[in-house]
Amino acid sequence: MAERQTRGAPARLDQPRETRRTLLPRPSVNQETFGVWSERFARFMGTPRFLIYMTLFVVLWIGWNAFGPADLRWDPYAFIFLTLMLSLQASYAAPLILLAQNRQADRDRVALEQDRARDERNLADTEFLTREVAALRLAMRDTATRDFVRSELRSLLEELDERGFEARRREADDSRSGSPHSSRDQSAT
């Protein structure tokens, strides 16, 4: 059975539609440039300078149209044109602010992912170093440390000094007593 396609509908949902030709070319917008501009605009709208400028503009508008010469007023008392301009400004400002927030959220997400990856690497490094330190501690129990060897050498040196001192004392005692036996013979008995 052959599949029937309606005009303009894709054969499958996972395949994009063919592009239609238009009479006028679509404008191409650099997403990054537009995003940077929207962030600057959103940042400016959040400053006290913007609030002061907007307040002065509205006060001058209302003041001129309420108290100015009657033949030069362009927006009578209901200030419908002012309301229209402020609504238009708000209708453009809201999507631009949302775009700037989305870009900031994307940057925050990337930074969070990088922080998470760095934390995982640090944790793995810390666990590795902990295992290495534990292995070194186990190995150090079986090997002689520098301090241990020094203390053993000191005790051996002291023991040798004591033996040498005893041997010299015996020789001195033997030479005073005038006995014909050497110190070796006395130590053997």
Image (cartoon, grey):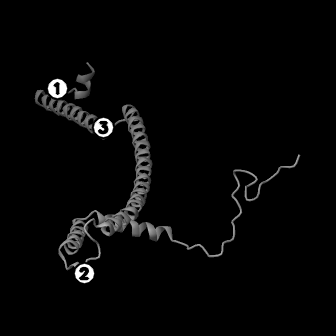
In this orientation, which residue lies closer to the viewer: 24 or 45? 24
In this orientation, which residue lies closer to the viewer: 125 or 50? 50
Q: Is residue 78 shown left or right of residue 90? A: left
Q: Which residue is mark 2?
A: 71
Q: CA distance from mark 3 to mark 2?
A: 108 Å
- The residue type indicated by label 1 comes to Ser
Q: Nearer the viewer, mark 2 or mark 1?
A: 2
In this orientation, which residue lies closer to the viewer: 47 or 140? 47
Residue 169, how many percent across, how many down?
Answer: 15, 31
Badge 3 or badge 2: first in the primary sequence? 2
- The residue type indicated by label 2 comes to Asp
Q: Which residue is mark 1?
A: 179
Q: Secondary structure at mark 3?
A: helix
Q: Secondary structure at mark 1?
A: loop
Q: Secondary structure at mark 2?
A: helix
Q: Which residue is mark 3?
A: 149
